[in-house]
Image (cartoon, grey):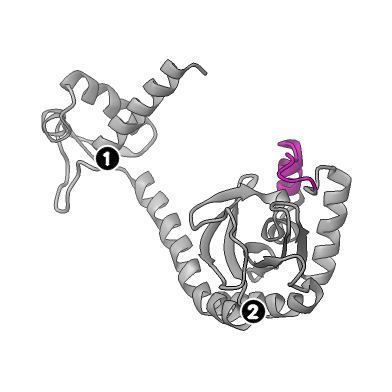
Amino acid sequence: MCPGERNDEGATAARLALLLTAFRPGDSALGVSELARRTGLPKSSTHRLIGHLARQGLLERDGTGVRLGLRLFEIGQLAVRQRGLADAARPYLADLREATRNTVHFAVLEGTEVVYLDVLRGPDAPRLPSRTGGRFPAHATAVGKAILAFSPDSLVEQVIAAGLGRISRRTITAPGLLRRQLAKARAEGVAYEREESVPGVVCVAAPVLDAGGTAVAGISLAGWANRMGTARIGPAVRTASLALSRTLRG
């Protein structure tokens, strides 16, 4: 993609966002003229962009105007549920950080990556590239492996088909080895990552499971490879994930 195409896409995305955020509390349907006035966009562009949004269900026709579509409500509910997950997890994450003084992550799987819903940095832990709202390839993280180990096989194959990119010298890039690690994690309830995302850092993770035993999220603990004993820390991470799983089911 050339720079001009990227700029065009960015400008289009910005105009679409302007239209969606032009609606205010109390608004029902707005006409093209009013939306053009609020956004500062030409009426012709406003009309064209409204058509795109309406076809995706993000806006709905209402007489001569448009209103926010139900698809936006559905997307908003997903965000609320994710925020609710993070809020429910926070006490368990805080206890784990307090007990170990290492960095605790809470993440969900989206496509082939984990998305960090919360990151509590430990005072004795190394600086890590992870951040709340950030993403990382699932195969290169303990929390990604923990989630994949308790996910449908189709998700695992999707991750493998996308390519197991090398993040560090020790990243697992062989599909067979990844599958064996996931099988071991499923049997033990705990997944490990040993300097596979960041040199000198190890990580232990466990899945947060729904009533059917499928992972909905994962908790991980990261620390220095020469200080944090993964075998010793594993049970604590597993206990936190089990407790959160019970809380979410209740």
**Circle 1: element type:** helix
Is residue 250 toward the left or the right of residue 27 in the image?
A: right
Q: Position of residue 36 (x, y in %)?
A: 15, 29
Please determine whether, in this image, residue 11 is positioned above or below residue 205. Answer: above
Viewport quadrant of the C terminus: bottom right
Q: Is any part of residue 250 visible from this angle?
A: no
In the displayed structure, 233 sits above or below 60; it is: below
Q: Is residue 213 magenta?
A: no
2 or 1: mark nearer the eye: 2
Where 76 falls versus 229 (above or below)? above
Q: Could you tell me which secondary element the residue under label 2 belongs to? A: helix
Please tell me which residue lies in front, 147 or 194: 194
**Which mark is on residue 100?**
2
Residue 86 x/y as whole percent: 49, 67
> Residue 50: where, in percent of width, then height?
27, 29
Q: Is residue 59 left or right of residue 150?
A: left
Magenta-drawn stretch contains 161: yes
Mark 1 Cα shell of 10 Å, populated few (<14), some (14-19), many (≥20) = some
Label 2 is placed on what type of residue?
Answer: Thr
Which region of the structure is painted magenta? 154-169
Residue drawn at x 16%, y 33% as measured from the top left: 35
Q: Nearer the viewer, residue 167 or 84?
A: 167
Apparent side of residue 161 relative to residue 11 in the rendered image (left or right): right
Label 2–label 1 contact, CB within 8 A: no
Q: How far separated are the C-alphas under marks 2 and 1? A: 44 Å
- Badge 2 density bin: few <14, some 14–19, many ≥20, Cα 10 Å: some
Which residue in the protein does label 1 denote? Answer: 20
What residue appears at the point 67 percent right and 60 percent down from the top-left corner?
A: 143
Residue type at tag 1: Leu
